[in-house]
Amino acid sequence: MQFDHFKSNQDDSLMSIEDLRSLRLRKQKIESDKKARKYILEINQRYRQMSDNKSNNFLKNMNPFKKAA
């Protein structure tokens, strides 16, 4: 049986047990990949925000008229 991976509205009643099992595993993998991407995106956003704050504070605290030691 041919299965289109991108169409989730196919008739499941004609699928074999192995096809249903593989479909369920595929859906679980897609969901876990989505969660992982979302988690990585949140970490990257937090890191960007922290590094922006550090660079802004560094530039604010830097005195251009102070002599280097």
Image: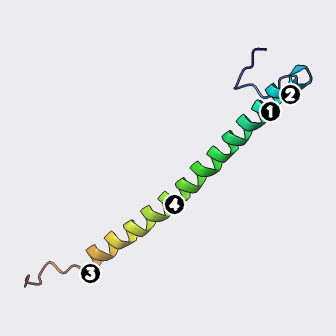
Considering the numbered disc 4 on the image, is that residue within a helix, a strand or a loop?
helix
Assign a secondary structure to mark 3: helix
Circle on res. 43: 4
- Mark 4 or mark 3: whose residue is earlier in sequence: 4
Residue drawn at x 80%, y 25% as measured from the top left? 19
User: Spatial distance from mark 4 to mark 3, Cα to Cα?
Assistant: 27 Å
Asked if 36 appears above or below 2 in the picture, the reply is below
- Residue at point 70%, 26% (across, down): 6
Q: Secondary structure at mark 1?
A: helix
> Disc 2 and disc 4: Cα gap in Å?
39 Å
Q: CA distance from mark 2 to mark 1?
A: 6 Å
Residue located beneath label 2 in the image: 17
Q: Which mark is residue 44?
A: none
Q: Position of residue 53 (x, y in %)?
A: 39, 71
Tell me which amino acid carries mark 2: Ile
Kindly check if marks 2 and 1 are in contact, taking CB atoms under 8 A apart as contact: yes
Specify whether 42 is left or right of 53: right
Q: Residue at x 48, y 58 (%)?
A: 44
Q: Which residue is mark 1?
A: 21
User: Which quadrant of the rendered structure holds the N terminus?
Assistant: top right
What is the three-letter code of the residue carrying label 3?
Answer: Asn
The residue shown at (75%, 31%) is 22
- Residue at the disc numbered 3: 61
As measured in the structure, the alpha-carbon distance from the residue carrying label 3 to the one carrying label 2 is: 66 Å
Residue 68, image x, y percentages? 8, 82
Q: Earlier in the sequence, mark 3 or mark 2?
A: 2
| Image: 5 above or below 58 | above
Q: CB of mark 4 within 8 Å of CB of mark 3? A: no
